[in-house]
Amino acid sequence: MLKWALIFLVISVIAGVLGFTGIAAGAAQISKILFFIAIAIFVIFLIMGLIAGEAIF
């Protein structure tokens, strides 16, 4: 997920440098959404791991 966010970020920067502002804004928005989804999934799995770790002991 973070790989795709980074790819869209690079696309956004390249499009912005070349003057394609519409494409740059769209790619930046997609990158931002993917980043926050990845962070949310990370937090969910972190909490699940901590809960599962406590159940064993």
Image (cartoon, helix red, strand yellow):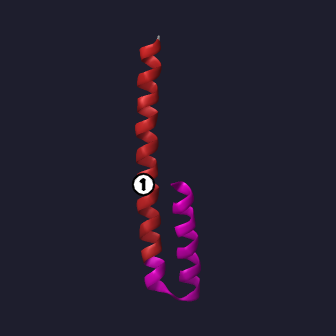
At x 46% / y 81%, what residue is drawn? 23
State the residue lying farthest toward the bottom: 19
Instruction: Identify the residue at image location x=47%, y=20%.
Output: 53
Q: Residue at x 53, y 82 (%)?
A: 16
- Residue 3: name its quadrant: bottom right
> Would you say residue 18 sits in the magenta stretch?
yes
Q: Residue at x 41, y 53 (%)?
A: 37
In percent of width and height, residue 4 lies at: 53, 61
Disc 1 packing (10 Å; few <14; some 14–19; many ≥20): some
Q: Is residue 46 above or below residue 6?
A: above
Residue 9 screen position, x and y as percent? 54, 68
Q: Tag 1: residue type?
A: Phe
| Membership of 30 in magenta stretch | no
Residue labelled with disc 1: 36
The x, y position of residue 51, in whole percent, is: 41, 24
Closest to the observer, 4 or 46: 4
Work out whether residue 11 or residue 19 is closer to the camera in this orientation and state it.
Answer: 11
Which residues make up the magenta segment? Answer: 1-25
